[in-house]
Image (cartoon, rainbow, N blue to C red):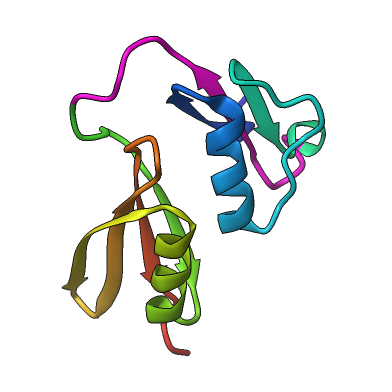
């Protein structure tokens, strides 16, 4: 027996607002019925190879670095970083290691994520 990816869940102050940001980043619509307390992207299709994204309102603010984060791959790192920054992300660092290049950012709620340059090939 094994587990299968179902959803990526992010805590935030306004679930519908953060879902709108990630909807633009991912190019996937926010599911109907989004509220400040809960919103989702792709919940009906979750478990079929593409995880849903869920957003839950919590009373506390983020205070420390995430212990886990999302990595998204892109064919044009510079253009995608510029695009998500225009959407509301904040750029933290540009990094390169062992031939891999990525940029660490935070979403509007402060959750870290990486945009990774697609390897040439």
- In the rendered image, residue 90, in percent from the top left (x then y), is placed at 31, 54
Indicate left or right for 52 with 55 as reference: right
Indicate left or right for 90 with 77 as reference: left
Q: Is residue 24 magenta?
A: no
Name the main secondary structure of what is drawn in magenta.
loop
In magenta, the rendered stretch is: 46-63
List the single residue furthest toward the top: 59
Residue drawn 39% across and 9% down? 59
The image shows residue 86, relative to residue 13, as above or below, that is: below
Indicate left or right for 119 with 22 as reference: left
Res 114 visible = yes
Residue drawn 56% across and 47% down? 22
- In the rendered image, residue 10, in percent from the top left (x then y), is placed at 47, 29
- In the rendered image, residue 74, in percent from the top left (x then y), is placed at 49, 72
Residue drawn 79% across and 24% down? 33
Residue drawn 39% across and 69% down? 81
Indicate left or right for 7 with 64 as reference: right
Compare residues 4 and 62 and report the one nearer the observer. Answer: 62
């Amino acid at each position: 027996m094994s587990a299968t990816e179902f959803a990526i869940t992010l805590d935030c102050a306004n679930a519908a607002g953060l879902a709108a940001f990630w909807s633009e980043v991912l190019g996937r619509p926010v599911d109907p019925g989004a509220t400040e307390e809960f919103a989702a992207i792709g919940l009906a299709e979750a478990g079929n190879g593409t995880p849903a994204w869920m957003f839950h309102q919590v009373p506390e603010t983020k205070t420390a670095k995430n212990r886990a984060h999302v990595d998204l791959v892109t064919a044009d790192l510079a253009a995608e970083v510029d695009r998500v920054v225009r959407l509301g992300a904040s750029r933290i660092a540009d990094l390169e290691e062992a031939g891999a290049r990525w940029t660490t950012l935070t979403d509007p709620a402060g959750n870290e994520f990486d945009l990774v340059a697609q390897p040439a090939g």
